[in-house]
C-alpha cells in the first residue's frame, strides 16, 4: 500500500497520513519494532516488512510511526507517517517500510499523541514467486529495554554453514555503551570487547562483525549494558530457503524467539 501526502480513510475506520513532526527527534518513543526493512538480502532474498496496527481500546488512538535507517542517529528528516485509529479499528501494510517511502534496513518507533499504544503485528518476510517465509518481530515497550547494569545473551546457530547469523542493536535517547562477551558452548569466555553507540541509533551486522571477533557454532553472545539503554536482537537465516528467525533479547540471559 502506498500513501500520498493527503489523509486516507480506510473502510471509514482508520486514517494514515504522511507528516512532519519533531516528536521523533531526540525523545524516546513509546515502543519500538527493533528491526524492519525493505531490501534485497543475501542468497537471492527479497525482504519486506508487513504490519498490522490495531487500536485495542474504546477510545480513538493517534500517533506517529517513524523509520530510523541503519547506521545513523535519529533525524527530523527520518520517514514518518501518522496513524488515526477509531476504537477497535485496524490498518494493514504489505510493506510498511516501502509505504513510508524508504528502502533498506532500520528500526521503527511508535509515538503516541492520543490514546494507548496500538497493538502492532509485524512480520519480516522473504518474498519469492513461490510464496513467502518470515518471522514475527515483537513490538517492544521502551520501558522494557535493557538498562544500565542489566545483561542478556543471544545464541549462535548450531550450523554456521547452513545458517547465517546477524546481531542488531537499537539504542535509546541516552545512547549505549555495552560489553560484549563471547562464550563457547561449554561456557568458556572466548572474547570480550566494549562498544559504544550514539543516541537513537540502529545497526545490524554479521555476528562476527558485531562482536569484533570469530563466532563458533552454539556460542553465546553476552551483552552487558554499561551505560544508557538499548534493545538487542539476533537473526538466524537459512542459506537455502532464506527462512528467518528472530530472537529479541530479554533480561538476565532470556530471549523471546519467533
Image (cartoon, helix red, strand yellow):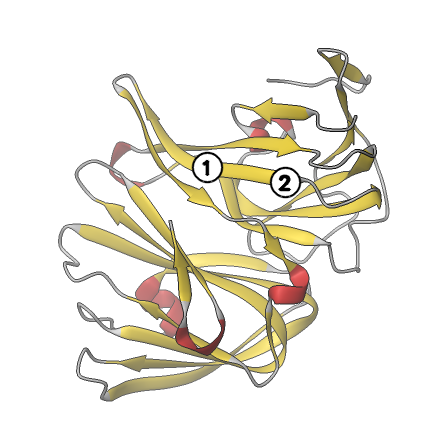
Residue carrying label 1: 123
Q: Is residue 214 left or right of residue 11?
A: left
| 131 or 20: nearer the viewer | 131
**Residue shown at the point (77%, 15%) measured from the top left:** 8
**Residue shown at the point (79%, 33%) measured from the top left:** 58
**Residue shown at the point (54%, 34%) measured from the top left:** 103
Q: Say if residue 213 shows up in the picture.
A: no
Q: Is residue 19 above or below residue 247?
A: above
Q: Secondary structure at mark 1?
A: strand
Residue lying at the far front of the rendered structure: 58
* Foreground: disc 1 or disc 2: 2
**Residue shown at the point (36%, 66%) measured from the top left:** 209
**Could you classify mark 1 by the number of other residues whose Cα lies within 10 Å: few (under 14), some (14-19), or many (20 or more)?**
many
| 67 or 249: nearer the viewer | 249
Residue lying at the far bottom of the rendered structure: 188
Q: Position of residue 108 (x, y in %)?
A: 62, 46
Q: Is residue 207 above or below residue 229?
A: above
Q: Secondary structure at mark 2?
A: strand
Q: Is residue 203 above or below residue 12?
A: below
Q: Is residue 71 left or right of residue 109?
A: left
Q: Is residue 244 above or below residue 225?
A: above
Q: Which mark is residue 119?
A: 2
Amino acid at each position: 500500500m502506498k500513501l500520498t501526502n493527503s489523509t486516507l480513510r480506510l473502510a471509514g475506520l482508520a486514517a494514515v497520513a504522511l507528516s512532519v513532526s519533531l516528536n521523533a527527534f531526540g525523545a524516546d518513543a513509546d515502543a519500538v519494532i527493533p528491526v524492519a526493512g525493505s531490501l534485497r538480502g543475501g542468497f537471492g532474498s527479497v525482504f519486506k516488512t508487513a504490519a498490522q496496527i490495531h487500536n485495542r481500546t474504546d477510545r480513538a488512538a493517534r500517533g506517529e510511526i517513524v523509520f530510523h535507517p541503519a547506521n545513523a542517529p535519529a533525524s527530523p528528516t527520518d520517514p514518518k507517517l501518522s496513524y488515526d485509529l477509531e476504537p477497535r479499528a485496524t490498518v494493514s501494510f504489505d510493506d510498511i517500510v516501502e509505504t513510508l517511502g524508504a528502502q533498506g534496513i532500520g528500526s521503527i518507533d511508535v509515538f503516541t499523541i492520543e490514546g494507548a499504544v496500538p497493538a502492532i503485528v509485524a512480520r519480516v518476510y522473504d518474498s519469492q514467486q513461490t510464496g513467502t517465509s518470515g518471522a514475527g518481530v515483537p513490538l517492544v515497550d521502551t520501558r522494557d529495554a535493557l538498562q544500565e547494569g542489566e545483561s542478556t545473551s543471544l545464541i549462535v546457530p548450531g550450523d554456521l554453514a547452513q545458517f547465517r547469523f546477524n546481531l542488531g542493536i537499537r539504542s535509546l535517547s541516552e545512547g549505549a555503551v555495552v560489553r560484549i562477551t563471547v562464550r563457547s558452548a561449554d561456557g568458556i569466555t572466548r572474547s570480550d570487547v566494549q562498544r559504544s553507540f550514539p543516541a537513537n541509533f540502529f545497526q545490524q551486522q554479521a555476528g562476527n562483525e558485531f562482536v569484533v571477533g570469530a563466532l563458533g557454532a552454539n556460542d553465546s553472545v553476552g551483552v552487558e549494558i554499561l551505560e544508557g539503554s538499548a534493545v538487542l536482537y539476533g537473526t538466524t537465516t537459512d542459506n537455502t530457503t532464506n527462512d528467518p528467525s528472530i530472537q529479541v533479547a530479554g533480561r538476565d540471559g532470556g530471549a523471546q524467539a519467533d
